[in-house]
Image (cartoon, rainbow, N blue to C red):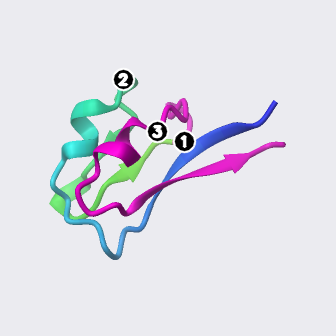
Amino acid sequence: MAKRKAIVSTRDCAACGCCIKVCPKGAITVPKGIYAKVDETLCIGCGKCAKECPTSIISMEVIGQ
C-alpha cells in the first residue's frame, strides 16, 4: 500500500506556523523560525498541512508503492 509524506520547499517557506497548528501528529516544527521541517517518522500523510499552507509550498509525495 502506498503511503504519502509531506515535503516542504524550505527555500520558499515563510515559517508562519500554520502547518504546525493543523498537524494531528505534531510532525512539523519550525526550528529557529527559519522554515518548517517534517518529521517523517511522525507524518501520517493526511495532507492537512499542505491544504493549510498559505504559500502552497508543502506538497504530498507518494512513497513505497
Which quarter of the rendering shows the N terminus? top right
Label 1–label 3 contact, CB within 8 A: no
Q: What residue type is labelled 1?
A: Glu
Left or right of residue 32: residue 22: right
Label 3–label 2 contact, CB within 8 A: no
Indicate which disc, 1 or 3, sits on the residue closer to the N terminus. 1
At a point 54% along the width and 29% down the height, the residue shown is: 44
Residue to which mark 1 is pinned: 40
Left or right of residue 44: residue 1: right
At a point 21% along the width and 65% down the height, the residue shown is: 34
Label 1–label 2 contact, CB within 8 A: no
Left or right of residue 12: residue 16: left
Neighbour class for label 3 at 10 Å: few (<14), some, many (≥20)?
some
- Label 3 and label 2: CA atoms lie apart by 10 Å
- Where is residue 23 drawn, in percent x and y? 34, 31
Q: Is residue 6 above or below residue 35?
A: above
Q: What stretch is highlighted in magenta?
A: 40-65
Indicate which disc, 1 or 2, sits on the residue closer to the N terminus. 2
Residue to which mark 3 is pinned: 47
Q: Which amino acid does label 2 sit on?
A: Pro
Q: Residue 57 carries which label?
A: none
Left or right of residue 30: residue 58: right
Residue lying at the far top of the rendered structure? 24
Q: Is residue 53 above or below residue 64?
A: below
Neighbour class for label 1 at 10 Å: few (<14), some, many (≥20)?
some
Q: Residue 24 carries which label?
A: 2
